[in-house]
Image (cartoon, rainbow, N blue to C red):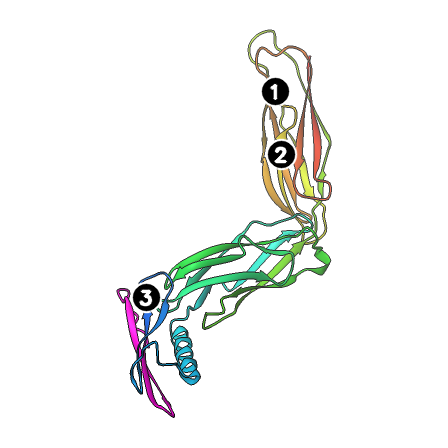
């Protein structure tokens, strides 16, 4: 067996085979000084003395030399170690490619082994960030990303099951697989309790404006059970310095859940009388993508 020592440069192995002409002996050297082990047959002793160009090699001897190299290659084979060995994705129906999850792959083989893997998936909706990963010496790790593409997936068929296969024909545990489960949520629906909020205030003769009562509106996910609305709210027009705040500006809502949003106005002293308008857009991945609420401010 090869030595597991990081400073090992080469190791010699002796072989022999008996033929009708007599005993053949040779040494196979495993050179570990480079990134990839190499195997060299040397010091061949024939029944007629040291091997010379004029001495032919019998086919049986050549075959045994090849078998010896194959045996040594097995002893220096890499070992595929994966972390994790299962993955679960939760994605929205039709949304597209998910955020990647990372798999760490380590060559757990003996010193002198070299791991180079190819990656393949059992379904077109399961993707990897690279098609192969190589050059991993003993105890060296690399990583790659795995993504689920929900463009063509529907929640009615959820969950989906797929397999990621990691292969290196030289590895002692080839191939390895990762089981992948993909849970597909139905699309959410954004529903607002009102589509307009009207504010009014009287401009003072001098000094600061009086406080304007806070108003609220509700955001509800009226999508089917299992849906999740990841929403954000932002100004659509801008330039409305009188709109002090609207909170919260983002959040997540399960099916049937509601979030109340508070709208706070505060007029600068130099604002004149008139009607001012701003629009808040509530958006998120959903069947209707966004809903707008108009804010009207009348200064008299």
| Mark 3 or 2, nearer chain start | 3
Measuring from the top left, give residue 35's x and y in whole percent: 36, 60
Residue beneath disc 3: 32
Relative to the observer, which residue lies in front, 29 or 243? Answer: 29
Q: Residue furthest top?
A: 205
Mark 3 crowdedness (10 Å alpha carbons): few <14, some 14-19, many ≥20: many
3 or 2: mark nearer the eye: 3
Mark 1 crowdedness (10 Å alpha carbons): few <14, some 14-19, many ≥20: few
State whether residue 97 is above or below residue 183.
above
In space, the residues marked 3 and 2 are separated at their CA atoms by 61 Å
Task: Kindly identify the residue that appears in the image at 35 percent across and 81 percent down.
Answer: 55
Residue beneath disc 2: 233
Task: Kindly identify the residue that appears in the image at 65 percent across and 27 percent down.
Answer: 236
Label 2 secondary element? strand
State whether residue 222 is above or below residue 13.
above
Q: Quadrant of residue 287?
A: top right
Q: Is residue 64 magenta?
A: no
Give the quarter of the figure containing the C terminus.
top right
Q: Is residue 19 magenta?
A: yes
Measuring from the top left, give residue 199's x and y in whole percent: 68, 22
Q: Is residue 190 visible?
A: yes
For the image, the number of numbered tags is 3
| Mark 1 or 2, nearer chain start | 2
In space, the residues marked 1 and 2 are separated at their CA atoms by 16 Å
Residue beneath disc 1: 239
Residue 34 is tagged as none
Q: Is residue 5 visible?
A: no
Relative to the observer, which residue lies in front, 76 or 259? Answer: 76
């Amino acid at each position: 067996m090869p030595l597991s020592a990081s400073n090992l440069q080469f190791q010699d192995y002796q072989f022999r085979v008996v033929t009708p002409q007599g005993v053949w002996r040779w040494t196979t050297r495993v050179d570990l000084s480079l990134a990839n082990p190499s195997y060299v047959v040397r010091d061949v002793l024939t029944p007629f003395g040291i091997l010379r160009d004029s001495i032919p090699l019998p086919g049986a001897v050549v075959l045994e030399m090849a078998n010896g190299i194959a045996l040594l290659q097995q002893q220096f084979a890499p070992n595929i170690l994966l972390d994790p060995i299962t993955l679960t994705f939760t994605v929205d129906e039709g949304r597209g490619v998910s955020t990647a999850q990372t798999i760490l792959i380590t060559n757990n083989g003996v010193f002198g082994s070299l791991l180079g893997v190819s990656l393949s998936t059992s379904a077109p909706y399961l993707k990897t960030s690279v098609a192969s990963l190589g050059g991993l010496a003993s105890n060296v790790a690399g990583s790659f990303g795995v993504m689920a593409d929900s463009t063509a997936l529907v929640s009615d068929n959820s969950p989906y099951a797929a397999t990621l296969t990691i292969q290196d024909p030289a590895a002692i545990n080839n191939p390895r697989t990762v089981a992948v489960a993909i849970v597909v949520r139905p699309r959410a629906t954004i529903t607002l309790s009102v589509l307009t909020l009207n504010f009014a205030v009287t401009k003072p003769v001098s000094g600061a404006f009086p406080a304007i009562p806070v108003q609220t509106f509700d955001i509800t996910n009226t999508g089917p059970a299992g849906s999740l609305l990841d929403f954000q709210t932002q100004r659509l027009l801008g330039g409305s310095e009188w709109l002090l705040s609207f909170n919260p500006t983002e959040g997540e809502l399960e099916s049937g859940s509601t979030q109340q949003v508070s709208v706070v106005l505060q007029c600068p002293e130099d604002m004149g009388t008139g009607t001012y308008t701003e629009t808040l857009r509530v958006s998120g991945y959903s069947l209707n993508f966004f809903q707008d609420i108009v804010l009207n401010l009348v200064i008299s």
